[in-house]
Image (spheres, rainbow, N blue to C red):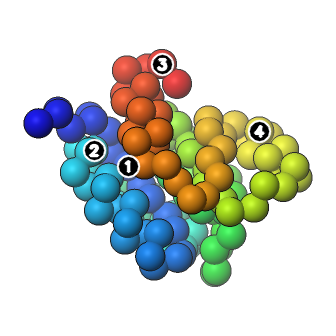
Amino acid sequence: MEDKIPLKVLFAEDDSITRLEVSKFLENKVEKLTVAQNGQEGLRLYQKEPADVVITDIRMPIMNGLDMVRAIKGFKKPKAVIVTTAYNETDLLIECIDLGVNKFLLKPLVLHKLEAILRDIAKGEE
């Protein structure tokens, strides 16, 4: 069995099927996983216990992922931010670059690729 990736990860996703699928995968891969249903909940959980890596959907109710990332970076900057979206829009990509997002992944997510990215982050290569 492979060693767990030594990272605390916050995963924010409003779609229940994606949230369940990705969180089930990640809970077996990373040291600690915290899961949120929207950006507001993600921000609250991050303020309570900051994560090393934030993985977030962009379009979510209550508070979107990019607003959450902005607020998180004002609180305590994580090692990395990975943004996921089903929308391949240039303006979103530019906003992610401006925010200093490390990775921009289109859905559906390729889980082994996400795992490889997290392993690189843990090694300081991302």
Q: Is residue 63 left or right of residue 42?
A: right
Q: Residue at label 2?
A: 30
Lower sequence index among marks 3 and 4: 4
Which mark identifies residue 97? 4
Callout 1, which amino acid? Val
Residue indicated by mark 3: 125
Q: Earlier in the sequence, mark 1 or mark 3?
A: 1
Q: Quadrant of residue 65?
A: bottom right
Q: Position of residue 38 (x, y in %)?
A: 54, 73
Q: Is residue 60 above or below residue 97?
A: below
Do the residues under discs 2 and 3 have CB atoms within 8 angstroms?
no
Disc 1 packing (10 Å; few <14; some 14–19; many ≥20): many
Q: Evaluate if marks 1 and 4 touch, with contact meaning CB atoms under 8 Å apart.
A: no
Disc 3 residue type (three-letter): Glu
Q: Position of residue 120 (x, y in %)?
A: 43, 25
Q: Is residue 72 left or right of residue 26?
A: right
Q: Residue at x 37, y 20 (%)?
A: 123
CA distance for labels 2 and 3: 17 Å
At numbered mark 2, what does the secondary structure look like: helix, strand or loop? strand
